[in-house]
Image (cartoon, rainbow, N blue to C red):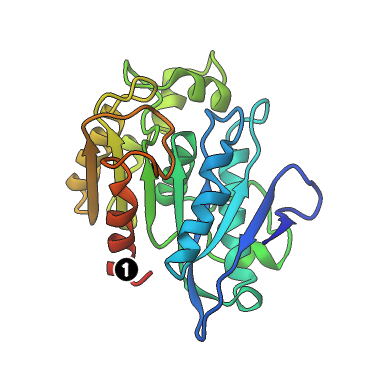
Amino acid sequence: MSEHPLWPTTGAATITAFPVRSERPAPAVVVLPGGAYQHLAGHEGAPVARWLNSLGIAAFVAHYRLAPHRHPLPLLDAARAVRWVRHHAAANGVDPARVGVLGFSAGGHLAGLLATETGPMLTEGPHDAIDEADPRPGLAVLCYPVTTLTGPAAHQGSAANLVGGDAPESVRARLSLTHRAGPATPPTFLWHTADDEAVPVENTLRLAQALARHGVLQEVHVYPSGRHGLGLAETDPVVGDWTRRCAAFLRGRGW
């Protein structure tokens, strides 16, 4: 495990590498913990990386910028994290062609923003050789994700921290994954609990419908009950099943 700055001129965003021993280049996943764009939930970072390691997958936990930083800075950090993994692939024993993203709650929203982004994901010219790498993930795993910033299903805290409480509806809609999904969105694994009181399950269901409209390969699981923020859910015999199903999804995609 080793931590590195994501950018050459600021230490506000970092990436922690959890490589694996492998005879051949391993697939990789960038992990984006949740926390309403206000903090980063520790149990959705390193423990998840170690679980991915147990599957033979190199993991990289991105510590992206949070409020008072606002969009597009978290997205730029997430894109930089994927670029960083690809640029340093050889040094970490990673296959640069197999880099995915996995996010929880607001981190799931950020992973989804990255997976649905079609623009350049740079606000200015390349900073260095890292920025020459492709920032688009090959697959996405979204765990009880925030997918809409509008309407009754929106998580208002995440929206306020990302774009400000007074952001116009058009901005919130533009950053809602349900409006951004398209045929270029990579294969996506989604899971949620039906009685999630913080981020309603409608977030996952609406995104699943949007992905289906565009023919995106997806796998969706809704568990009957469970509080928001379960992470690996190791103590829940029902919801904890998501890691087994996700492992099968990753294997099926060549991860």
Q: Nearer the viewer, residue 109 or 120?
A: 109
Q: Which of 35 and 111 is in front in this view?
A: 35
Indicate the quadrant where residue 68 lies. top right
Q: Can the viewer see residue 164 in this picture?
A: yes
Q: Which residue is drawn at 63% across and 39% down?
A: 73
User: What residue did someone put label 1 on?
Assistant: 251
Q: Residue at x 48, y 34 (%)?
A: 106
**Residue 65 position within the rendered picture, expressed as x and y whole percent measured from the top left:** 66, 38
Left or right of 192, for residue 114: right
Quick check: 243 above or below 53?
Answer: above
Q: What residue type is labelled 1?
A: Arg
**Regarding mark 1 in the picture, which secondary structure is present there?**
helix
Check the picture and name the quadrant holding the C terminus: bottom left
Q: Residue at x 41, y 35 (%)?
A: 230
Left or right of 224, for residue 145: right
**Residue 154 position within the rendered picture, expressed as x and y whole percent measured from the top left:** 38, 22
Number of labels in the image equals 1
Quick check: 8 above or below 129?
Answer: above
Q: Nearer the viewer, residue 53 or 73?
A: 53
Q: Can the viewer see residue 136 in this picture?
A: no
Q: Residue at x 57, y 19 (%)?
A: 164
Left or right of 149, for residue 245: left
Q: Nearer the viewer, residue 242 or 64?
A: 242
Quick check: 193 above or below 245?
Answer: above
